[in-house]
Image (cartoon, rainbow, N blue to C red):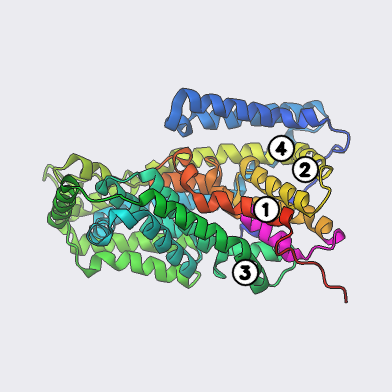
Amino acid sequence: MKQHGGNETVAENRTSTHPDPATEHLSLWLALLPLGCLVLMLGLAVTLFGDDASGGPSQLALIFAAAITVVIGVLRGQPYEELENAIIDSIKLAFKACLILLMVGSMIGSWMLAGTAPAVIHLGLGVLDPGWFYPATLILCACVSAAIGSSWTTAATVGIALVGVSHILGLAPEITAGAVISGAYFGDKMSPLSDSTNLAPAMVDVELFTHIRHMLWTTTPSFLIALALFTWIGWGQTESIQTIADVNTTRALIEQSFSLGLPAFFPLVLLLVLAWRKCPALPTITIGTLAGCLVAVFCQSSVTRDFGDPGGELGTTLATFRGLWLAMTDGFQASTGNAPLDQLLSRGGMSSMLNTVWLIIAAMCFGGIMEKTGLLARIVTTALKSVHGTGSLILVTVLTAIGMNIIAADQYIAIVLPGRMYQLEFKRRGLAPENLSRTLEDAGTMTSALVPWNTCGAFMAATLGVATFAYAPYAFFNLVSPLMAVAYGFLNIRIVKIVQA
């Protein structure tokens, strides 16, 4: 999963927090008012600002929606201090995600400087065929993610390189990002190393491998559909003479600008090994960043020195130190002489993640206050009244998980809250708990990357350099999975009943 490590405990505690006033007398229209205002303002932000909406307009929309919710809470008699504390507690849930984002920015900068990302791009340009690029991206990312259990690490390593390769091959980066995310979330969902794969069954008391085996029934067809769609989209894509020339020119420029020996791959290999051994995300990424710095100093000394001191005014040591500092804080700026390649390689830095951190904080403000005022609970209570059978129960669970990703802006909450809310209802209807745990993954895990202000969606957009709304239509695996869960529910396919003792 995203490897926050420990957020599930915070999420469990959060589910036991009840708003002060009784929620059963709340008007549904009042509960929907902040959400409706948010949808309206976010739609207006996208219309007016397009891809730049996440640079401030979306954050402002979330803050305004949170303010409307605060007013409702105060008018209903809740002390402002309690509401403010709820917002602060909600923001605390995202602190680790924000720290990871900042360190990923530093890691990208150091890996560009070290030649790690350019080396992977150089290798990919030599072996990947345009006609099979999209399905190959899906399979490669699925294999890496299944091995290490982390969609975030997969996207931040091979995902970045594959998006870079797509630019040079003249392929659509948004489709490539969709393939990266689809593959990355296959492992996030199915790997026993993934914390979401462990969290979902833990919420409803299901054995881990029972949960994984039950997920195969919806995951396998979803993945095959995604693979077929990416194959169909890429069918007929060929390298023109101009494309071949561009690829050869790009590879030659990368060779001239960086040392592409085995040491350049060391930070990537080290990071994957640490992730596979389930080391916590933050120290893993920090170690990956420092490994990039070491490779930059010893194997890319001229690149590092020239980047740190283009005017040649500092000594070698100070120039090298300044180059590392700049790459980690403001990102690497390439100067190969080729404008498209320079734009591709000029990436990273903590500063590149600040808008994303701002977006996450604003989203957590809204989610926390919606929960504290009881408006969220009122919406869910109404949703349960529409349940008349297994299909409608799974549909409501799916919609609730998606709603949690939108409102609470956190993948863990999208798993924990619906799991707690619907566990008794599944049991009352004689449905085995693995049906619920599978549905939580099909909806809660899969749709988190499709919401721009969710921690997962914000991370993917910032890391891959492709807006969430741009790649979302092509994240086929993520889109199909919740539909498959609903279809299985209504068609009564692989719905396990409780075995009576």
Q: Is residue 99 left or right of residue 83?
A: left
Residue in the picture at 45% in, 52% down: 229
Name the residue beneath numbered marker 3: 212
Task: Tell us which disc is closer to us: 2 or 1.
Answer: 1
Q: Earlier in the sequence, mark 1 or mark 3?
A: 3
Callout 2: helix, strand or loop?
helix
Q: Badge 1 local density, few (<14 within 10 Å), some, or many (20+)?
A: some
Kind of residue at badge 3: Ile
| 113 with respect to 271 (left or right) | left
Kindly state the secondary structure of the residue where label 3 is placed.
Answer: helix
Residue drawn 33% across the image and 57% down it: 132
Q: Observer-nearest residue: 410 or 186?
A: 186
Look at label 1 and name its amino acid: Ala
Nearest the eye: 65 or 127: 127
Prevailing secondary structure of the magenta residues = helix
Q: Nearer the viewer, mark 2 or mark 3?
A: 3
